[in-house]
Image (cartoon, rainbow, N blue to C red):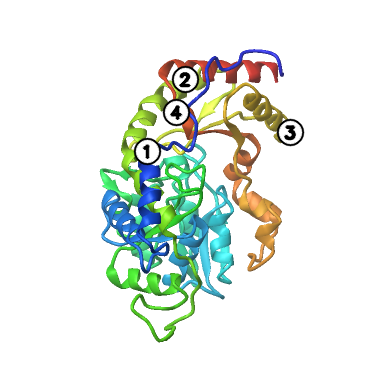
Amino acid sequence: MSNGVRLGSELPAWPTYGDEEREGLIRALEQGQWWRIGGGEVDAFEAEFAAAHGSEHALAVTNGTHALELALEVLGVGAGSEVIVPAFTFISSSQAAQRLGAVAVPVDVDPDTYCIDPSAVEAAIGPRTRAIMPVHMAGQMCDMDALGKLSADSGVPLVQDAAHAHGARWRGKKVGELGSVAAFSFQNGKLMTAGEGGAVLFPDAGMYEKGFVRHSCGRPRTDRGYFHRTSGSNFRLNEFSAAVLRAQLARLEDQITTREQRWPVLSRLLAEIPGVVPQSRDDRGDRNPHYMAMFRVPGITEERRAKVVDVLVERGVPAFVAFRAVYRTDAFWEVAAPDLTVDELARRCPHSEALTRDCIWLHHRTLLGSEEQMHDVAAVVADVLAGA
């Protein structure tokens, strides 16, 4: 499969950066205070990020995993409780709960959108359920109508894992306008990045203050006497990362617009390839930032899929195998595991099982390319799969 159609020109690089990031780093350097308590970059970024996502309360943290962990902690998740997560997601979704001593309960996803299945969530809610974590997979928002009703009826709060959903909307509402906590990631591959970083949107000031104290070693902002009010850790974001993220945020909307224009083209072309089924879109998610361009090749083996991905990368397409179902990782079983076997969970999650085997994704920088490059990418995918 090594010889064949190749990408004719390089796709845009990621991360994207320019003078705005350089100026921000110098600004942070020259202010003389490089941590958030004495500087101004983190505070400014939080205000700008909150406004961009329809919230009044954003808390910047060290990374997206910590954002999820802190969000759950503020909601009272701990040992003896359960958090419902999609089986098909990056491991942080489950690990954030397990690190708090809670049991992550994986449930199946929709086979078309790859987002958590509300009916599976409803069936999994029990007396120990303390949170439901919908993951907006690849920027496609979960069914927030159904999940919102489930949350209201059961009294179990939602924690949106929005690591893929910067700038996303559901029925015209931004992530921060949906009334629930939401956690974001700024890891190197994400839609906006400072290499690492994260943020939590809180629906009210009281939750924000709890989050702030816990993310700063249990210490209030004005404390000078080391009166640590509660347990916590050091999840504070530094001033340099915040300065970079302010620049990244400023170009986010234009990049989303480009990806929204490119995905319909690439999706149509991929769908014309025999055996390829692109991720579908729920149109109620009327702004999709497209963290990934995802598609399935039903019937392919994991071994063959890995080879296909390797050849795509050789030919200039930034391809990856999709996430493994969380219960099919060793890490999932180390702490606070459910009282079920892998086989039992697999029977409950047939769609997650299929995605584990046959799903491929392309990095979002693919969708920042030209329309002509979308044709080139599809031609490479078609050629590689034909050779497979």
Disc 1 on helix, strand or loop?
Answer: helix
Which residue is label 1 attached to? 19
Q: Residue at x 51, y 60 (%)?
A: 84
Q: Earlier in the sequence, mark 1 or mark 4?
A: 1
Q: Work out how far the residue at label 3 is from the one at label 4, CA to CA, in angstroms.
A: 27 Å
**For the residue marked with disc 1, what is the amino acid?**
Asp
Q: Residue at x 32, y 61 (%)?
A: 40
Question: Is 336 placed left or right of 47 in the picture?
Answer: right
Few, some or many C-alpha atoms within 10 Å of disc 2 (few <14, some 14-19, many ≥20)? many
Q: Earlier in the sequence, mark 2 or mark 3?
A: 3
Q: Earlier in the sequence, mark 1 or mark 3?
A: 1
Disc 4 on helix, strand or loop?
Answer: helix
**For the residue marked with disc 2, what is the amino acid?**
Met
- Are the two marked residues, 2 and 4, in contact with CB atoms closer than 8 angstroms? yes
Disc 2 on helix, strand or loop?
Answer: helix
Q: Work out how far the residue at label 2 is from the one at label 4, CA to CA, in angstroms.
A: 8 Å
Residue 105: name its quadrant. bottom right
Which residue is label 4 attached to? 367
Q: Residue at x 31, y 38 (%)?
A: 253
Label disc, if present, on residue 303 of the rendered structure: 3
Label disc, if present, on residue 345 of the rendered structure: none
* Residue 115: percent from left, percent from top: 47, 45
Residue 234 versus residue 51 in the image, above or below: below
Q: Nearer the viewer, mark 1 or mark 4?
A: 1
Can residue 248 be seen here? The reply is no
Q: Work out how far the residue at label 1 is from the one at label 4, CA to CA, in angstroms.
A: 23 Å
**For the residue marked with disc 4, what is the amino acid?**
Leu
Q: Earlier in the sequence, mark 3 or mark 4?
A: 3
Q: Work out how far the residue at label 1 is from the one at label 3, CA to CA, in angstroms.
A: 43 Å
| Front residue of this view, candidates 363 and 158 | 363
